[in-house]
Image (cartoon, rainbow, N blue to C red):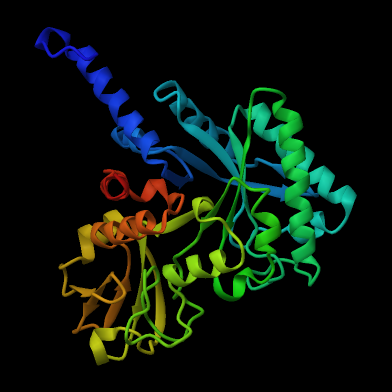
Amino acid sequence: MCLRSSRFVPIVLACALAILAGMAQATGYRVVGYATDWNATQARTLERIDTLIFAFAHVEHGRVVLDGDAPERLRRLLALKRIKPSLKVNIAVGGWGAGGFSEAAATAEGRQAFAQSAAALVAAQGADGLDVDWEYPGHGESGIASSPDDRAHFTLLLKALRQALDRQAGKGRHYALSIAVADGPFVDGIDIAAVAPVVDWFNLMTYDFVNRMTPTTGHHAGLYRSRLAPADARTADGAVRQFLAAGAPPEKLLLGVAFYGRKFGDVQADHDGLYQPYGHYQGEHPWPELKRDFIDRNGFARQWDAKARAPWLWNARTREFITYDDPRSIAAKAGYVKAGRLGGMMYWEQMHDPEGELVDAIWQGLH
């Protein structure tokens, strides 16, 4: 029971936090964020988050290791558990352009070395699980080694990881195992039905649908297909449908949200630049920069695609285009998660939301 007297403000605050935590647990939805680091100003956001996934550990000589300043950055995340004991902090291995996976997974010995080193790292650091971010099995677009055998080897690698994590955890504890996955052609190297029973959840990277490698602009994190998009355009809804059709349980699918935008220059002006050819790609901008410099500023006008449920920015004078997620599109995605009874939402990345505005939008949308 929570006392209402003003003389018991600390007790009331503690009760309020407990109620919030209980509400989060009662919904059954996960809020999972990747984090390269933690900014002390983000403490208020912490109560909205169930799991932070540290990015990144890497594969070196077939083993999972932390290098550079990664140990210190991970320690800052783990220290948050003193503030919120229920917070889970997992370690992600990989990322775009991070190799070593195909080689390690190719043999039984390699898979065991990878799995044992990963499980030992999780335990030694006091983390709560592992996220495998192999981008992507069977694909070498990022410059990493790949093989047609990656599909079968990936399943075997995840099974070895599950066994190693269980052995390391012992009785009474469970280390989580998740994987970061993309849709469309990037998922043909994963046997989703075989992998689903092994992992705790899938982090669907339902963003980066348009980027420096695509021929036109468009929604890089659109929920549905725009009326201007080609028939094969990738969308968050398309990704979910693809994974469900392949055998993934809906409660294990976490819909991804982007805390950054992608900018294109020298864009053809038709339809305010949406799904138009462009001259050059101009890079990424995190949410604080979008608000400070671009959203209805400096000649950029915010537009809304009612069919795709996605915003974009268009500068008619400079012919520049920016695609991004915002609180409105996040709310639409949260509604989609609830309607489909998915497992929750994931985002990249925590340092791009120092004021907690986008994390708030996720949490409020799911509650």
- The outermost residue toward the left is 6
Q: Is any part of residue 188 visible from this angle?
A: yes
Q: Position of residue 69 (x, y in %)?
A: 57, 39
243, 352: nearer the viewer: 243
Which quadrant, please, contains the N terminus? top left
Residue at x-position 38% and y-position 81%: 217
Q: Position of residue 170 (x, y in %)?
A: 72, 25
18, 46: nearer the viewer: 18
Q: Is any part of residue 182 visible from this angle?
A: no
Residue 86 location, quadrant:
top left
Q: Does 79 sit above or below residue 92?
A: above
Q: Does 192 sit above or below residue 110?
A: below
Residue at x-position 22% and y-position 66%: 294
Residue 306 location, quadrant:
bottom left
Judge left or right: residue 169 versus residue 54: right
Residue at x-position 65% and y-position 22%: 172
